[in-house]
Image (cartoon, grey):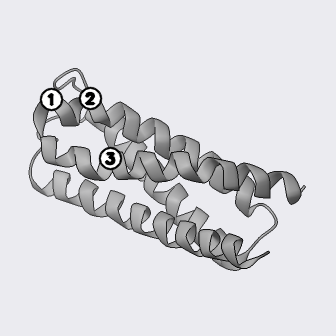
Amino acid sequence: MNVKDRRIHLFLQLFFLLIGLYQFVRLIGSLQSGQFSGNLFEFQSNNLPALSIASALTVGFTSLISSFSMWTRAAWTYGFTLFTSGILFAYHLMNLGSAILHNSYEIIPIVIVLVVVLQSFPFLLRRSYRSV
């Protein structure tokens, strides 16, 4: 691994760690604010709160696992990180519509995540093919 790849590797490791922590802080904040008040299995504004919570937990856990696997440099690191990037991209792209409609300040972190994930795809693809 050359110096440029090491820097990208370290940046992605810290990025996935921060995204995992951000997801959990955002989830705890929305649970405490009463955003999911009432029954979790009733539709609220065309959304099922139980599925929103489950998807936020999935994205948070996979991001933290990706960060940890990049730290340990396991053999499956880049493939799993590529999988996590896809989940992260889809999750934030789906949440972009409600952020535009309800709270425009949430757009900034969502767009930052989308841009970083799109920029990291070539590196992760190259590294995942080399590790096979």
Quadrant (top left, top right, bottom left, bottom right) of the C terminus: bottom right
In contact (CB < 8 Å): disc 1 and disc 2:
yes
Disc 1 marks which amino acid?
Leu
Quadrant (top left, top right, bottom left, bottom right) of the N terminus: bottom right
**Cα distance, mark 2 to mark 3?**
11 Å
In the rendered structure, the answer to whether residue 19 lies left or right of residue 100 reads right
| Image coordinates for residue 90, horizontal then vertical, percent | 47, 36
**Cα distance, mark 1 to mark 3?**
14 Å
Q: Which residue in the structure is indicated by mark 1? A: 101
**Cα distance, mark 1 to mark 2?**
6 Å
SS category of the residue bearing label 3? helix
Q: Which one is nearer the viewer's eye here, 120 or 94? A: 120
| Image coordinates for residue 117, horizontal then vertical, percent | 51, 50
Q: Which one is nearer the viewer's eye here, 130 or 48? A: 130
| Disc ID at residue 21 | none
In contact (CB < 8 Å): disc 1 and disc 3:
no
SS category of the residue bearing label 1? helix
Please tell me in which quadrant of the rendered image residue 96 appears. top left
Please tell me in which quadrant of the rendered image residue 5 appears. bottom right
**Badge 1 or badge 3: first in the primary sequence:** 1
Image label count = 3
| Image coordinates for residue 110, horizontal then vertical, percent | 32, 47
SS category of the residue bearing label 2? helix
Q: Residues within 10 Å of mark 1 (few under 14, many from 20)?
A: few
Q: Residue at x 40, y 43 (%)?
A: 54
Q: Residues within 10 Å of mark 2 (few under 14, many from 20)?
A: few
In the rendered structure, the answer to whether residue 75 lies left or right of residue 19 reads right
Q: Residue at x 84, y 51 (%)?
A: 129
In the rendered view, would you say 86 is above or below 48?
A: below
Q: Which residue in the structure is indicated by mark 2? A: 97
| Disc ID at residue 110 | 3
